[in-house]
């Protein structure tokens, strides 16, 4: 058996065909099998110490059926692992029959172990995670200190992998706890940004914007992105819709309400039951440029009955990137919202005006209404009006308002039309 350059050869076998996308679990399994084959052993495994038990997390075996499988467990006192860690039995045992004390260990009686290697897996915080072990049903007198050194080297690699795995588990648990707390507190809080028809100088709609009033202080897109990562994105969006519509109860006026909704939430089919507080014709479902769509047929199939009931669809952030144009072409929106990257400084930037003009002409030919976002100056508003844009929103006209402030502005608008 050729054992020259064992670490280099085994590391190549472990990483063969692998890249950054290979999961930690698959890397560990590949490593175990490479070591087992190199040592010509029957079984290799990684065990985790869990209280009084050891749990076999990863197993590579050439025995069918394997004497142990991933997920199996056994009391620590019945096996070799803890005794190796505590120094009561050797880490390298080419022939178990030569170590008399092994005869009294329950594992020796229940499983014919002829040769055994075992080394602790120590994590970076100094804690012993468990052991990395190989055993064979027959003795193997060719095993030596070089093999033990190799096992220790790979135990260090395993510790690195397991540390990363545990970090990922811990990070996932923290995300779940944060988003669960958000949902339990009825967050997000919603504010309303007025959308004006500039020719009439009145509010014709509001965009509902989420705000999170809890720690850690982060922008809404980060909260929603984290919720999607752990499978709670739809629930958080539905929470936002409930909060938005609840704040508009008994609000004067017939303005429309634009709700930011991801394609995933629409495709889930859950949204319809959350929109009963307003007449359908007052609701606009606003799909953002950053929302990826894998299946436009499925999305349009879910939108069809909502649109038939009178709801409208808007594509947000148009002009910000390629995805928004895909949305426009595939969804045929009722409203196209020009991204602030186009409107910001449009009065002094001819390329911006040219691109905005192209989108405005496209909207005219497809019978879509245009809304310009991010209008912050009178000169930007004037430039947009010259291009034919009548519906606008932005800090020049109004900042996002709490429900009470919005109601005051709407009542003032009714008194002074």
Image: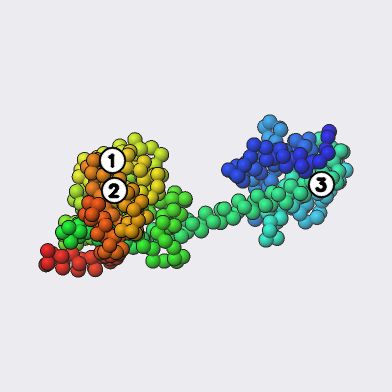
Question: Please, is residue 32 above or below residue 379 in the view?
Answer: above
Distance between mark 2 and mark 1 Cα atoms: 18 Å
Q: Which residue is mark 3?
A: 148
| Left or right of 59, for residue 328 | left
| Left or right of 101, for residue 271 | left
Residue at image point 18% right, 64% down = 410
Q: Where residue 40 appears, x then y in whole percent?
A: 78, 35
Mark 3 or mark 2: name the one nearer the start of the chain. Answer: 3
Name the quadrant of the N terminus. Answer: top right
Nearest to the observer: residue 122 or residue 314 = 314
Distance between mark 3 and mark 2 Cα atoms: 72 Å
Q: Nearer the viewer, mark 3 or mark 1?
A: 1
Q: Nearer the viewer, mark 2 or mark 1?
A: 2
Nearest to the observer: residue 231 or residue 417 = 417
Q: Which residue is mark 1?
A: 332
Mark 2 or mark 1: name the one nearer the start of the chain. Answer: 1
Q: Are marks 2 and 1 in contact (CB under 8 Å)?
A: no
Badge 1 crowding class, 10 Å Cα cut-off, few under 14, some 14 to 19, many 20 or more, is some
* Image-quadrant location for residue 16: top right
Q: Which mark is residue 28?
A: none
Q: Which residue is mark 2?
A: 357
Q: Are marks 3 and 2 in contact (CB under 8 Å)?
A: no
Q: Nearer the viewer, mark 3 or mark 2?
A: 2
Any part of residue 148 in sight: yes
| Left or right of 210, for residue 163 | right
Q: Where residue 237 appears, x then y in whole percent?
A: 36, 53
Q: Where residue 178 appears, x then y in whole percent?
A: 46, 60
């Amino acid at each position: 058996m050729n054992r020259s350059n064992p670490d280099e050869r085994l590391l190549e076998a472990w990483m063969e065909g692998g890249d950054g996308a290979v999961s930690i679990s698959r890397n560990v399994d590949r490593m175990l099998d490479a070591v087992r084959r190199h040592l010509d052993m029957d079984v290799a495994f990684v065990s985790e110490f869990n209280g009084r038990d050891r749990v076999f997390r990863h197993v590579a075996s050439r025995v069918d059926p394997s004497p142990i499988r991933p997920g199996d467990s056994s009391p620590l006192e019945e096996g070799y692992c803890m005794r190796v860690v505590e120094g009561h039995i050797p880490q390298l045992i080419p022939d178990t029959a030569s170590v008399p004390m092994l005869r009294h260990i329950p594992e020796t009686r229940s499983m014919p172990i002829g040769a055994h290697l075992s080394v602790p897996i120590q994590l970076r915080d100094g804690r012993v995670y468990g052991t990395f072990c190989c055993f064979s049903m027959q003795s193997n007198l060719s095993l030596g200190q070089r093999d033990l050194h190799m096992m220790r080297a790979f135990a260090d690699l395993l510790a690195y992998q397991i540390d990363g795995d545990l970090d990922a588990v811990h990070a996932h648990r923290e995300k779940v706890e944060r988003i669960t707390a958000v949902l339990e507190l009825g967050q997000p809080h919603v504010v309303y940004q007025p959308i004006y028809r500039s020719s009439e100088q009145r509010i014709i709609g509001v965009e509902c914007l989420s705000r999170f009033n809890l720690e850690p202080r982060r922008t809404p897109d980060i909260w929603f992105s984290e919720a999607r990562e752990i499978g709670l994105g739809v629930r958080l969006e539905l929470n936002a819709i409930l909060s938005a519509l609840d704040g508009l109860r008994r609000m004067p006026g017939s303005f429309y309400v634009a709700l930011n909704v991801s394609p995933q939430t629409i495709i889930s089919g859950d949204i319809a039951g959350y929109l009963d507080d307003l007449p359908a014709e007052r609701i606009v479902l606003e799909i953002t440029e950053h929302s990826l769509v894998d299946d436009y047929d499925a999305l349009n199939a879910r939108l069809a009955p909502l649109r038939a009931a009178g709801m409208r669809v808007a594509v947000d952030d148009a002009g910000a990137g390629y995805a928004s144009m895909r949305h426009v072409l595939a969804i045929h929106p009722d409203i196209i919202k020009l991204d602030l990257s186009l409107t910001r400084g449009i009065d002094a930037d001819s390329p911006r005006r040219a691109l905005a003009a192209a989108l405005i002409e496209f909207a005219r030919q497809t019978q879509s209404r245009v809304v310009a976002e991010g209008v912050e100056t009178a000169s930007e508003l004037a430039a947009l009006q010259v291009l034919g844009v009548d519906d606008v929103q932005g800090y020049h006209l109004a900042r996002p308002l709490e429900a009470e402030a919005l109601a005051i502005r709407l009542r003032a608008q009714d008194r002074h039309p």
